Image: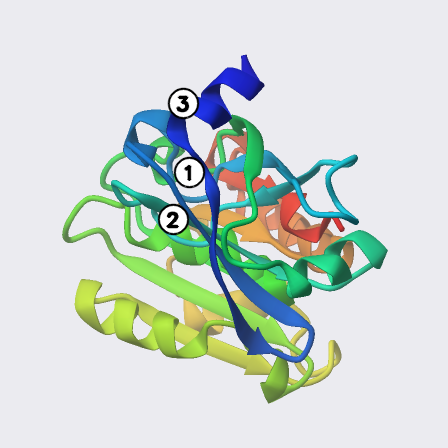
Amino acid sequence: MPLAKSIRHKLMVDKVVNEGPGVVSIYIKGRDVKKLNAQGGQFFSWRFLSKDLWYQSHPYSLSASPSDESMRITVKALGDSSSELTHLKSGTRVFIEGPYGVFKASSARRGRHIVLIGGGVGITPLRAIMEEFPNNTQIDILYRASHESELVLRNELDELSDRIGARVHYLVGSRQEHTMSYEYLKKFVPNFQDSEVFICGPEGLVSAVKEAAKKAGIPKNRFHDEAFAFHG
């Protein structure tokens, strides 16, 4: 049961860290967190027992691979409920349901070249997935944003990509500049048609990349998309 699970693991807010305009990371600590068997990129339904949030729950994806004692989500203030998350206090109790979803590294076929495409705060589950692929996996990350200020977790992406040998491409500017068409994507990933694609971002971005994947002949079982990072 969700209630029993949350009590057993003694989940609570550890800290809230500002990541950029309207974006925060919420660190949740607890006992034997690893035994929740969550993987980076999966999501939980979260209920924070604060005055203004206790009566509602919302799905948010993990933005880092869980450790033995902690998990993290990274949230953008899109509405009243997600805005309240920026004011959470350390020690606030947390109830969860999950983990849910197949948006995770283990869903990929072993040995495939991996392409991770994120838009705005949609990069957060992809950042979590990055660190869970087998060693020597070839990974390209394409990160779309309208402005530099919208590049969430950029320092982490740079450090992690250096450590695992991945390539990060920051695509900052208008949609007209970065069309995300098949021809455009091949400029960054020449073997795009042979890759396994994970994408999380606004509907327009997902639709454009889905069309590019279709044109490239990428089958549905090598195309993974997620929308829960955008629930507020």
Q: Position of residue 183 (x, y in %)?
A: 57, 67
Estimate how packed mark 2 is, as few (under 14), some (14 to 19) or many (20 or more) residues with alpha carbons within 10 Å: many
**Front position in the image: 114 or 146:** 146
- Residue 63 in sight from this viewpoint: yes
- State which quarter of the image contains the N terminus: top right
In the picture, the disc for residue 129 is: 2
| Front residue of this view, candidates 11 and 132 | 11
Tell which circle, 3 or 1, labels the residue nearer the N-terminal end: 3
154 shown above or below 161: below
Type of residue at label 1?
Answer: Lys
Badge 2 or badge 1: first in the primary sequence: 1
Relative vertical location of residue 76 with respect to residue 62 in this rendering, above or below:
below
Q: Where is residue 118 drawn, in percent x and y?
A: 56, 61
Question: Which residue is pictured at 65% across the width and 43% down the height?
Answer: 228
Kindly indicate the quadrant of the structure image that contains residue 145: bottom right
Which residue in the rendered view is the most extreme toward the top? 1
Q: Earlier in the sequence, mark 3 or mark 2?
A: 3
Q: Which residue is mark 3?
A: 8
**Distance from Cα at disc 3 to Cα at disc 2:** 27 Å
Secondary structure at numbered mark 1: loop
Crowd tier of the residue under label 1, counting other residues whose Cα lies within 10 Å: few below 14, some 14–19, many 20 or above: many
Do residues under tags 2 and 1 come within 8 Å of each other at their CB atoms? yes
* Left or right of residue 93, residue 211 in this image: right
Q: Amino acid at mark 3?
A: Arg
Where is mark 1, residue-wise?
A: 104
Where residue 127 sits: x, y (%)?
A: 42, 58
Residue 182 at least partly seen: no
Determine which of the numbered discs, if any, sits on residue 64 in the image: none
Left or right of residue 164: residue 21? right
Foreground mark, 3 or 1, reads 3
- Look at the picture and state if 227 lies above or below 166: above
Distance Cα–Cα, label 2 vs label 1? 6 Å
